[in-house]
Amino acid sequence: MKSETFLKVVVILLMSMIILILGVTAVTYLSGHYDSNVMTFHVIAGFLILTILPIHIYLRRGKLKKLLKEFISIVTAGGAKQPCTNHAHLKTFKQRSLKELCEGLNICIDEATEFLDQKGIVIYNFKNTLEKIANDNKNDPLKIFALIIENQIRVRKDGYV
């Protein structure tokens, strides 16, 4: 996994550098400073981008497949279909207040806030949305939601409820 990440970074850096070279050599040519060395450099950069592009496509194949499926869905059905509704449900929790969330899930708000406090997440107001609490603590709302659920599972497993 580390080698694939390293390869992704190297490919992106190379592609960025080559695109910059292509741009500079094209501007140089268009400004009237024709030089055979500049054109040779431009052609070599073009050739390199064409050799690196298949590697980039291979490394990003999963995202490209997903993007293609979404595009086909939008073109044929007029909208993108969510393959999994769980993410949509989780995203709706971000707009709910902590109090509303705990009441809806039948979780003791005091236990949840105590556990979050132990994890370094400060709650200033129970009526704040999970997103606001996450922003105040420089955290991710879905991570805070996961912590609340984790605590609830731990509490029920230990037999406190």
Image: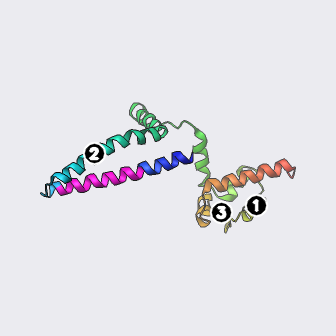
Q: Quadrant of the N terminus?
A: top right
Assess whether residue 25 is covered by the magenta stretch.
yes
Q: Residue at x 14, y 58 (%)?
A: 31
- Mark with earlier residue (1, 2): 2
Q: Which mark is residue 95?
A: none
Amino acid under disc 3: Lys
Element at badge 2? Answer: helix
The picture quadrant where one finds residue 136 is bottom right
Where are the magenta residues, as a range? 12-28
Q: Residues within 10 Å of mark 3 (few under 14, many from 20)?
A: some
The picture quadrant where one finds residue 49 is top left
Amino acid under disc 1: Phe
User: For this rendering, which residue is in front, 150 or 99?
Assistant: 150
Amino acid under disc 2: Gly
Residue that numbered label 1 is attached to? 115
Residue 149 at x, y = what percent?
72, 51
3D distance between C-alphas at marks 3 and 2: 57 Å
Element at badge 3? Answer: loop
* Viewer-nearest of discs 1 and 2: 2
Q: Is residue 115 left or right of residue 73?
A: right
Residue 152 at x, y = what percent?
77, 51
Q: Residue at x 70, y 58 (%)?
A: 99
Residue that numbered label 3 is attached to? 127
